Amino acid sequence: MAGLTDFYAGAAPGWAAGATKVYGPLARDLVAHSPHPLQQRLVLDVGAGTGAGSAALRSAGARPVAVDLSHDMLAWDRSSRPPSAVSDVLALPFPADSFDDVVAAFVLNHLVEPVAGLRELARVTSNRGAILATAYSTQSASEARERVDDVARSQGWEPPGWYVSLKSSMAPLVGSAASMQAVAREAGLAHAVAGERPVDTGVRTAGELVDYRFGQAHYAEFLASLTAGETDALRRAALAAAEPVMEPYRPIVVFLTAIVGE
Ligand SMILES: C[S@@+](CC[C@H](N)C(=O)[O-])C[C@H]1O[C@@H](n2cnc3c(N)ncnc32)[C@H](O)[C@@H]1O
């Protein structure tokens, strides 16, 4: 993992308490669309974060194993988490065919080389196993979310450089059904179907949306620099800005379902 920076260091509490209001339902939706029942199957949750995918897998009766580049994210709530390993998705510490299936929720969009990432996921997946992956569509938009960001900017927040390059360079590589399909094809996955659709996260209130947004990793460092009073004032201002335009939060998600093998 030489040279790889953990941009999620310090983000676990916010992610678990806030961002998971969105990522939890998205993980359950992903797992629910598995092409086969996951009961008793050994499933790698890659880019597991604080465990949204692993929890969805356990609810579906699967046996998850978690991998993430970020020790902080994997260590969150560690006593109740599945077995885990700190690892780069591009160099997984497992022999070929180690897992029945693989889940990769919102991690391929972090990679400069998503084709190499999918090849590595295919390597550790057994023949006829599924790779289930998600990324945000570049078409996904929310005025309320934009307003939260605008308020934060007015209080001194700047999107960190890693997040700017993720959004401008990496995310578009898998940011549509067509691009995800092309990545899967190039990775040699012959039986792969990509699609995109809005997913209802169940987030209805501006308060939930603010919790989600400020729980994301690109806010962690800024929020940690504020006093409690400044944080309260920021939240109140974000809430007031988002409330008038708040709609049920339904991001557009790109899905990949691939079956490994000939
Ligand atoms: C957007 S979060 C998604 C977390 C979780 N899957 C969820 O849905 O809540 C992306 C996660 O991928 C991890 N990650 C980023 N690049 C990675 C890499 N090259 N290898 C493994 N994990 C990586 C981050 O540390 C982070 O925990």
Image (tube, grey):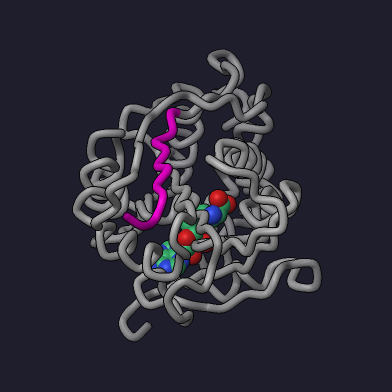
What's the residue at 37%, 55% (across, down)?
108
Magenta-colored stretch includes residue 213? no
Q: Of residues 257 and 30, which is closer to you in this image?
A: 257
Residue drawn at the location 24% of the way across and 56% of the way down: 188
- Which quadrant of the figure has residue 58? bottom right
The answer to whether 193 appears left or right of 234 in the picture is: left
Q: Main secondary structure of the magenta part?
A: strand
Which residue does the image show at 62% across and 75% down from the upper left?
Answer: 84
- From the viewer's perspective, tell me whether residue 26 is left or right of residue 202: left
**For residue 162, above or below residue 52:** below
* In-image side of 252 versus 9 (left or right): left
Towards the viewer: 84 or 188: 188
- The x and y percentages for residue 227 are 65, 57
* Percent position of residue 122, x then y: 38, 63
Between residue 94 and residue 251, name the one nearer to us: 94
Quarter of the picture containing the C terminus is: bottom left
The range drawn in magenta is 252-262
